[in-house]
Amino acid sequence: MKHRIRIFGLLIMVSMSLVIVPACQKDNNNGSDLPADILVLDNWIWEGMNEVYLWSAYIPDLDPKQEPDPEAFFYKLLYKDDHNSWITDNYDDLVAMFNGVQMATGMSAHPAYYTGSQIVYFVEYVTPDSPAADSGIARGDIIFTIDGNLLDIDNYQSLYYQNTATFGFADWNGNELIPNGKNISLTAIVMNQDPIIYHDVIDYEGSKIGYVVYTQFTDGENGEWLDELNSVFEEFKTAGVSDVVVDLRYNPGGSLDLAAYFASTLAPVTAMENNDVFVNLVWNDFYNQYWAGADLDEDGKADGVESTQLRIRLPQSDENLDLSTVYFLTTGGTASASESLMAGLYPYMDVVQIGTTTYGKCYASVTIDDWAVPKRHNWAMQPLVIKYSNAEGFTDFVDGIEPDITVQDNLLYAKPFGSLEDPLLGRALEEITGVAPAATKSLQYQTTFKSIPVPRKPLEEWHADLPFRK
């Protein structure tokens, strides 16, 4: 039987005991002119944020009884440097997203300016067994039109994120994009998306090298993706790989606990057996004191800094590969748990990062839904509640983690995952063996294209049975 670990961080059920403004007639709204349902949301936001938010000491002095737009109210409370907390009016969809279940076509694409104001999309990857994969769309395809429309700054997002759309494709002839007549209609479906979209054992220059493309730190709805991850590691171990390349180019994060397990599987066996520190966690002042004074391990005394809510250690892994060096492929889309995986391994082994600078997020968040029974609304907050550092104190990489070896992820000449002509993978193989694969295309985009930052939410969450002050 495969070894299973306890993964905490994909769905955080929060139990809170607070005095809540009841959702009843306006006469009982404590002098506010706002509708009762808006007051319920505003007070829930106010109480929750003042309780758990990492920067609770900096929350402005606002009156929740005077805030007609709960979403806008939430964002007014955020610390000036916080660009990662968010709120949604659909808790169920948020839970599904953390479990890897979403309405999706299975296609991930990145926008870029082409000529003037025109925008095109470059397909980064396609999830196996998805509508996009079944239609023949592949990594490196270039979307030129959607529903027959050229794309610009006003329509490129709304057209791309439709549930049903027809995508028109073009080819690059070295000087310009030429529509190729390929038009594919896709309809999004509810997908439980496997975060491992490619893996292989590459035999190169006498070395066996494990390669895995990982797109989210999630164990799935019922642990199925943890089982899949263990199967990949088991395959690597059975093959006797000497090195591992982990492709995190398009991974926005996920569970810190799962990142710790991933790290434990890659790390030297002594670090795993010693349960060495993966990351240390800092909350706001109240929770730092609370967790240090709590007895979560039920040994009759306060846990102190060893509290499981203040320190994540490397867990045991039956699939441990006992590596001394590991290679990571990164882009600006590499965020949160992906960054923690690299940073958490720095003290124990050589970490070689190839690609471009990561997103930059040394924080984790917690999901807070309505704590009333029965629930009064389906909103959920995802505020930052933790700042983490590795065992050596490395943190504050808010501008991203710079690579050891800079190589552009050139989607204009994108190669299939596992191809020796992929510039990033090829550079990793060269580092491992000293022999470079066959020459690849230019590592830089043509000046014709200018990448557009994608408004993705880096995913990171943490489990905590929060006590909540009354």
Image: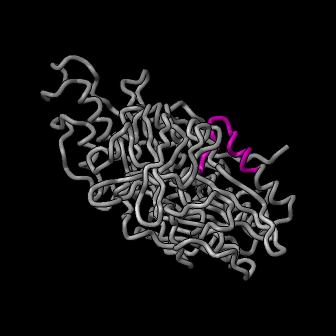
Q: Which color mode does the image show?
A: one colour
Image quadrant where one finds the N terminus: top right
Q: Residue at x 34, y 56 (%)?
A: 83
Residue most toward the bottom? 434
Residue 227 seen by the camera = yes
Q: Is residue 449 left or right of residue 102?
A: left
Q: Is residue 289 visible?
A: no
In screen coordinates, is 404 left or right of 36? Answer: right
| Quadrant the C terminus occupies | top left
- x, y percentage for residue 379? 37, 33
In the picture shown, does residue 417 fall above or below 37? below
In this rendering, is residue 378 above or below 447? Answer: above
Q: Quadrant of residue 277?
A: bottom right
Inspect the magenta stretch and tell me whether residue 227 lies in it.
yes
| 439 or 358: nearer the viewer | 439
Q: Quadrant of residue 177?
A: bottom left
Instruction: Please count the marks in the image.
Output: 0
Residue at position x 44%, y 69% in the image? 445
Q: Bounds of the magenta span?
A: 217-230
Percent x, y of residue 468: 42, 42
- Whether 58 is among the magenta residues is no
Please tell me which residue is depicted at 69% across the width and 71% down the height of the picture: 326
Residue found at x 39% / y 53%: 120
- Residue 108's x, y, as percent? 50, 48
The residue lying toward the viewer, choosing from 468 and 330, is 330
